[in-house]
Image (cartoon, helix red, strand yellow):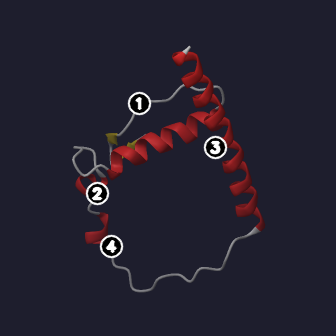
Amino acid sequence: MVVHDVEIIRPVVAASAAVARFTAAERALAVLRDNDSKKSLALLCSCANSMDVTEVPKHKGPSDSSKDDLSDDLKDIAEVSEILTQMNDSSCA
């Protein structure tokens, strides 16, 4: 994952593309949120300083497609959880 031409994390290999995306996003978010990291979002991005925001768009509520996306995300999270549980169980054995 790359933010403002800075590589945040390396590509992730997983059982499926969905799991890889979820894992990569989770890892990248942790790095971007870490204020002690050289790759924290606060240090990498100053876009808010140069943006001219005059009006905030109003939220229209969830659409049918966003509900489907949420369902897909929940399935992906369950799959990642199962994989991590299996990995943890096998490392403890």
Mark 1–mark 3 distance (CA, rounded to whole Å) = 20 Å
Q: CA distance from mark 2 to mark 3?
A: 28 Å
Whole-percent x and y of residue 89?
A: 59, 22
Picture quarter containing residue 81?
top right
- Identity of the residue drawn at 67% across and 77% down: 61
Q: Which residue is mark 3?
A: 77
Q: Position of residue 10 (x, y in %)?
A: 41, 30
Left or right, 35 with reference to 72: left
In the picture, the disc for residue 51 is: 4
Q: Secondary structure at mark 2?
A: loop
The C terminus - image quarter: top right
Residue at 21% in and 47% down: 36
Callout 1 amino acid: Arg
In the image, what residue type sits under mark 2?
Cys
| Residue 80 location (% of width, % of height) | 62, 36
Badge 2 is on which residue? 45
CB atoms at circles 1 and 3 under 8 Å apart?
A: no
Q: Indicate the amino acid at tag 4.
A: Met
| Distance in Å between CA atoms under marks 4 and 1 | 29 Å
Callouts 3 and 4 close, C-beta under 8 Å = no
**Residue type at numbered disc 3:** Ile
Residue occupied by mark 1? 10
Element type at mark 3: helix
Alpha carbon of mark 3 to alpha carbon of mark 4: how far? 34 Å
Sequence order check: which comes first, mark 1 or mark 3?
1
